[in-house]
Amino acid sequence: MSPVHPPGEAATARAVIDENGVLVHFNEHAGRLLGYAPGEVEGRPAAELLVPGSPVPRPEPDGTRWSGTVELRHRDGRALPVWLLAHRRQHARGEAWLVVTPVGGSGRHPEDDTLTRTALTCSPCALAIYDENLRLYACNQAMAELVGLPQVHIRGLRLAEIVGRPESEELEFQAREVLESGRRRDVQTYLRSGAEGRAHAWLARFAPLTDGGGRMYGVCMTAHDFTEQFLARERLQLVNEASVRIGTTLDVTRTAQELADVCVPRLADFVSVDLLDPPDDEGRPGPSSVTAPVTLRRAAHRSITPGSPEALIEPGRAGLYPASSPQASSLVAGRTMVATDLATSLTEWLEWDRARGERVRELGVHSTMSVPIRARGGRFGVVVLRRFRRPEPFTPDDVLIAEEITARAAVCIDNARRFGRERETALALQRSLLPRKLPYTAALETAYRYLPAARAGVGGDWFDVIPLSGLRIAMVVGDVVGHGVQASATMGRLRTAVRTLADIDLAPEELLTHLDDLVIRMSQEAGLEGTTGEVGATCLYAVYDPVSRRCTLARAGHPAPLMIPPGGTARQVELPGGPPLGLGGLPFESMEIDLAEGTVLGLYTDGLIESRQRDIDTNHRLLCSILGECAGGPVSLDEACDRILNALLPPGGVPDDVALLLARAHGLPASQVKTWEIARDPALVATVRKDVVGQLEVWRLSDVTFTAELLVSELVTNALRYGGHPIRLRLIHDAATLICEVSDGSPTAPHLRRARTYDEGGRGLLLVAQLAQRWGSRHTAEGKTIWAELNLLE
């Protein structure tokens, strides 16, 4: 067979043997060596090329490489001792052995001897020289020891053929780039050389070898082991990643899952996080000591295998761990435990839990590390890390980084549990302060939704519907700055204040002014004298009168409401903004709008439209669109609330409190209202009483005629005696209530007083208070109105 290369040029004889020992590839250089054409031997057993009885070298301990001298049979029948190097590689037909050996000359140049001697003498590290064909020309002893092969045997092989790993092909590609460009190049790689028991981090530095005239002779490669620096950087990156990824929420389960996710696959192949149930004493972080056996609840786990088939306990379920288990031994001792030989160190535990023992043997788990989760002197649980796919056992450096990551997670878990307790307290406080149900009123049909913040803590959002005199109804939505118990307490004080101020029938802008003063005083009570805005809040207050069908609104820094007329489109009410509560000294403005029958008002807090998924304008348009669809169809307000929340809020909880109040306005028919103008003549009281009795008969309210007649008589008499002109009597009724209102031009408010025995008067308002379900007075633009309500359902 004629040579395919000149006699002085080196080449590689290559053959591929599949797992059944059949030759599936035999290159021309191999044929040149043994005298066969490739087609003559491919598809035949490789053993036919061996001299009978010739021993084959045994693979190295990791089973991925073998080398040695083998007696091969030449085609002419003679025995030919050949040094072979074999690597286990992936082939089209599965795993196979790639067998190589150099053949031919070395391609020497006259000046190579001096170059070789100089390079080998001066290099303080592993060094190899490759010729212009990137075949090994020479290497020093350090490089030969590194690859674990004698120089005399591998001279003439390419770099990828010597190392035999996928990373080596990239190194050879980089060497070719240096050869072609003539420029130096540094390459970092992480691989296991032939003589190493585990992978190392290497810095391969390639430099072109040229003479003074620029002639290229080859490439010089030096290898520098920087594993310690590499691992230190990896550990630092992992700790930094843990500080970013662990504790993103104040949720214990989520934090435990983040801990497991960070450790896999960078530190372990499988990680489980098991926690002690929280103590009954909520003031303590956890027990300072634990005795075995111990019951732990699985909080999270993570595996390199999708679906975590290694797990025997699902998250949320509890398991009992004896003293011999890694979980209990680590938690009881309060320190990290590492077991590198499970067959002997954990025999008692694996025999006690046979299912676990079978799983450990099936997976080939060879190293386990258990780290207790501790913070503030208490113990919360344990993290167990296992390795079965990665061959290296846990090292002391692995222990340090696992403890560092677990310590960070422990603080986050402690914070999450403390937050959970505070959040439950705040929720309980908030539930006690918010209305459990809205009052029934003929003026408004209402629906609401309230969602506390899932992560930031319960906030100070609130809403309310407050019945006023004359069948009027007040609606309020507010938002206190901040979260937690303090925000909920502040919200409760403001809600109580609003109800108190609403009860004396203040106009919306006046009510907000008084509320602003209260917020300033609350800041001062908190030790912030001379400052404003430290306890901040926003508020929207609206009063709807079903008789006039007008709504008066004012707001203090709160989002403007939406209005949807029947069959129309939703639009924002152009209401003056007003400053947030707590700034002080700035005025509030109110405005009136007419509400047609069936008009829907939408009041909400900013948590509804502020999100990370969409900007505020997009959410606002989406809210208007949904409300417009609901207003024109047979959709109830309750269903409209659900549609809005589903469309605008992200799954898994909201970052801020959300309050939503929808109200559909209903007017009171004119037939249910009767008004009389009364001249200032005491003799007219009898006439007024007669007119009232007649009107009650028309309304079929004869059952309350006597009581209503007495109320009207007392109220009209007081107005004639103490009030000013004009005097007006108005009766209003719905299905549940009859209201008597007497208005006059005097701003002086009446008050109850105890009449002495010999007094001839002073008992009128006392009689009104006894007869009416409730009564009161409110100031008007002309003077005042005294009103009394009778319950028609008794």
Image: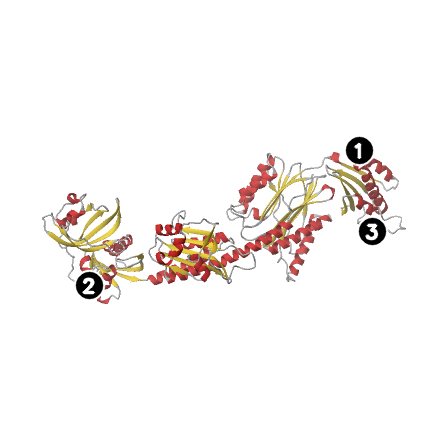
Compute the Cα span from label 1 to label 2. 125 Å
480 or 514, nearer to the observer: 480
What's under tag 1, amino acid-wise? Glu
Image check: 448 left or right of 159?
right
Image check: 34 left or right of 729?
left
Q: Image quarter for residue 568? A: top right
Image check: 578 left or right of 347?
right
343 or 419, nearer to the observer: 343
Compute the Cα span from label 3 to label 1. 34 Å
What's under tag 2, amino acid-wise? Thr
Q: Residues within 10 Å of mark 3 (few under 14, many from 20)?
A: few
Of the residues under marks 3 and 2, which one precedes in the sequence? Answer: 2
Q: How crowded is mark 1: few (under 14 residues within 10 Å), some or many (20 or more)?
A: few
Q: Nearer the viewer, mark 1 or mark 2?
A: 1
Q: Which residue is drawn at 83% across and 51% down?
A: 753
What's under tag 3, amino acid-wise? Arg
Q: Image quarter for residue 789? A: top right
Find disc 2 in the rendering and name its residue.
116
Please provide percent x and percent y for residue 76: 9, 48
Compute the Cα span from label 3 to label 2. 120 Å
Of the residues under marks 1 and 2, which one precedes in the sequence? Answer: 2
Contact (Cβ within 8 Å) of mark 3 with mark 2: no
Please provide percent x and percent y for residue 17: 21, 47
Number of numbered tags placed on the structure image: 3
Find disc 1 in the rendering and name its residue.
697
Of the residues under marks 3 and 1, which one precedes in the sequence? Answer: 1
Please provide percent x and percent y for residue 461: 61, 50
Find disc 3 in the rendering and name its residue.
753
Question: In what element is the residue under mark 1?
Answer: helix
Q: Nearer the viewer, mark 3 or mark 2?
A: 3
Please, which colouring scheme is shown? Answer: secondary structure
Contact (Cβ within 8 Å) of mark 1 with mark 2: no
